[in-house]
Image (cartoon, helix red, strand yellow):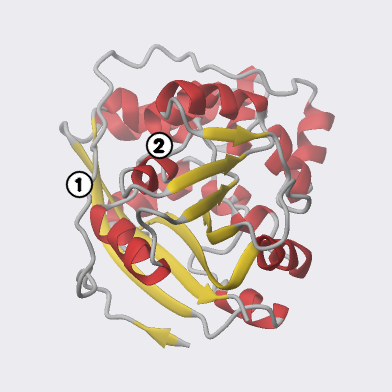
Amino acid sequence: MQRSPLDGNRPPGARAIPYRRQRVARPYDGTVTGDGPTPDDDVDRVLADKALLGREGFASGADLYERARPGYSGESVAHLVSVLGIGPGRRVLDVASGTGKLTRELVATGATCVAAERSASMRGSFARAVPGVAQVGADALALPFGDGTFDAVTVAQAFHWFATVEALEEFARVLRPGGGLGLVWNERDESDPLVAELTRVSRWDVHQPYPVGRDFGAVVDASGRFGPVTRSRFRFTQWLDRSAFVEQVASRSYVVVLPEDRRRAVLDDVAALADRHPEPIALPYLVDCFTARAR
């Protein structure tokens, strides 16, 4: 597996796409959107089952996700666009598209994009954020498209929920021969002291759905349907006011499903951490990208 230096350099010929920073101006009032299960025994069952958490954790609260989560850096998007050959005349399927954080950047290239997302809540927020882009309510394991329909398949911040050979078989099926696959994650840089403390107080170290820095290229290689896999990493910083800092945590799947008392306890601890830092608060990220071609 090839690796690029962790320097965020744009590949030759790639088009720069500006990263849109987000801020939320109102003060945190202790409330969040999204109604997760309330009985503790139900919550613990969901938290213990990652597949169930992936479904329940994003069944509601999409507007909060759209408001608080970062988009993708211009460097990382330009990398995907260049390596996968995304642009005018190309058809791209964005799987588990969420609220369209990546989709909107791909649309800006002139490509024809289709979004596949299981959550009705996410699809509603997507329609408001990325109007005019076709959506389907579909699971990654059962895509309602014919063989060879797309030139590229992308998955942003979601492949860990369905990182299986079966999903990769389905991606390969809907891709034309030689079509591109791009997997991308925004991962908070845990070498930063603030992020390390945020990991602890937000219980991310307990409930994270996959080990930070996991080599998903090995999963892609194991499918035998794609290769070779290239891993590239980029840096960027999300600048947040205190409200957005708390809401970024509130949008996480394992927080959404908590009953109100447990959710409030987590968010109060995060708010206390935010109060110890001047605004805007810098939250550094590593963007982890895996790209490959269908065999």
x and y percent of residue 275 in the render?
26, 28
Element type where label 2 sits in the image: loop
Q: Nearer the viewer, mark 2 or mark 1?
A: 1
Element type where label 1 sits in the image: loop
Quarter of the C terminus within the rendering: bottom right
- At label 1, counting other C-alpha atoms closer than 10 Å, the crowd grade (few under 14, some 14-19, many 20 or more) is few
The residue positioned 39% from the left and 59% from the top of the image is 86
Residue 183 vertical placement versus 30 (above, below): below
Residue 161 vertical placement versus 97 (above, below): below
The residue positioned 53% from the left and 85% from the top of the image is 228
Q: Quadrant of residue 25?
A: top left
Amino acid type, mark 1: Pro
Amino acid type, mark 2: Arg
Could you say which disc has been placed on residue 78 in the image? none
Does residue 30 appear in the picture of this structure?
yes
Residue 26 vertical placement versus 194 (above, below): above
Asked whether 154 or 2 is in front, the reply is 154
- At label 2, counting other C-alpha atoms closer than 10 Å, the crowd grade (few under 14, some 14-19, many 20 or more) is many
Q: Which of the two discs, 2 and 1, labels the residue nearer the N terminus?
A: 1
Q: Are marks 2 and 1 in contact (CB under 8 Å)?
A: no
Could you say which disc has been placed on residue 18 in the image? 1
The residue positioned 27% from the left and 74% from the top of the image is 6
In space, the residues marked 2 and 1 are separated at their CA atoms by 16 Å
- For label 2, the residue is 69
Asked whether 231 or 193 is in front, the reply is 231
x and y percent of residue 140 in the render?
70, 51
**Farthest residue in the front direction?**
89
x and y percent of residue 116 in the render?
62, 42
Q: Quadrant of residue 23?
A: top left
The residue positioned 43% from the left and 29% from the top of the image is 66
